[in-house]
Image (tube, rainbow, N blue to C red):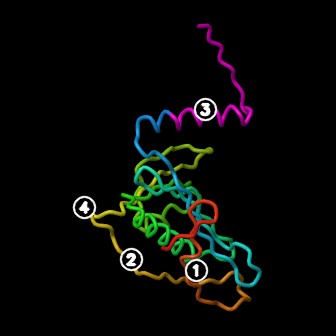
Amino acid sequence: MNIHIETGVAPDAGIIEFLEGKLMAHNREKIPGYAYENAILTVRDEADGDPAAGLHGQIGGGWFYVASLWVRKGCRGQGIGKGLLTCAEELARKKNCTGAYLYTYSFQNPGFYERLGYEIFGTLPHFCGDGAKYYMKKMLIKEEGMPVRLPEQLYCLFECQPSEKRRLVKVRPGHVHLGPGQPVGV
């Protein structure tokens, strides 16, 4: 066989899809039930209906991956991020996940995750110059194999602008979706 290696920084989307499909097929051959479910948690501003915060995660391999967690600038520091992460962890427990993991950057306040029980298990130093990329995890199952239980309902203070009145928002089961339009309870 003659081998030719092509290089490129902006490859055709089709080749990326091809490679990922081949890798997924290989993994499915080796790991029974290998699949990922998407989970989306959204907090909407009652005033305009726009997203004020959200979390995208993936459940697979017995773990919950926090792919992205975002809170609108004017809404930070109100407990919304903590509330979303807590709801995601409860969903992960109900899906029998062993733990949750994510990565964050040194400028994204890794201490936020550490205060919520996440620990760094890997670091890429000198990431984008003098920064770092941290890989973090949190075990959701106690050593004796029982899930850690949290309160059934979760509330957080929601305040987007100093001029707005502070209001209490309950993160409700209807805000959690697995896949396209399939709500699940948290």
Q: Amino acid at mark 2?
A: Leu
Of residue 47 and residue 135, the one placed in the foreground of this image is 47
Of callouts 2 and 1, the N-terminal one: 1
**What label does residue 143 carry, if any?**
4
Q: Find the distance from the CA under tag 4 to the CA under tag 1.
A: 32 Å
- For disc 1, the neighbor class at 10 Å (few under 14, some 14 to 19, many from 20) is some
Q: Amino acid at mark 1?
A: Gln
Instruction: Tell me the magenta residue range.
Output: 1-25
Q: Find the distance from the CA under tag 3 to the CA under tag 1.
A: 42 Å
Q: Which residue corresponds to mark 1?
A: 78
Q: Nearer the viewer, mark 4 or mark 1?
A: 4
> Which of the 4 image quadrants contains residue 57?
bottom right
Q: Find the distance from the CA under tag 4 to the CA under tag 3.
A: 38 Å
- For disc 3, the neighbor class at 10 Å (few under 14, some 14 to 19, many from 20) is few
Q: Amino acid at mark 4?
A: Glu
Q: Nearer the viewer, mark 3 or mark 2?
A: 3
Residue 156: x and y, percent?
Answer: 54, 82
Q: Are marks 4 and 2 in contact (CB under 8 Å)?
A: no
Q: Is residue 50 magenta?
A: no
Residue 7: x and y, percent?
Answer: 69, 23
Of callouts 4 and 3, the N-terminal one: 3
Q: Is residue 18 magenta?
A: yes
Q: Which residue corresponds to mark 3?
A: 19
Of residue 26 and residue 13, the one placed in the foreground of this image is 26
Residue 70: x and y, percent?
Answer: 62, 65
Q: Nearer the viewer, mark 2 or mark 1?
A: 2
Query: Residue drawn at (54%, 71%), measured in percent from left and top?
Result: 84
Query: Residue drawn at (52%, 58%), measured in percent from left and top?
Result: 66
Q: Amino acid at mark 3?
A: Leu
Q: Which residue corresponds to mark 2?
A: 150
* Image height of 80 relative to 157, above or below: above
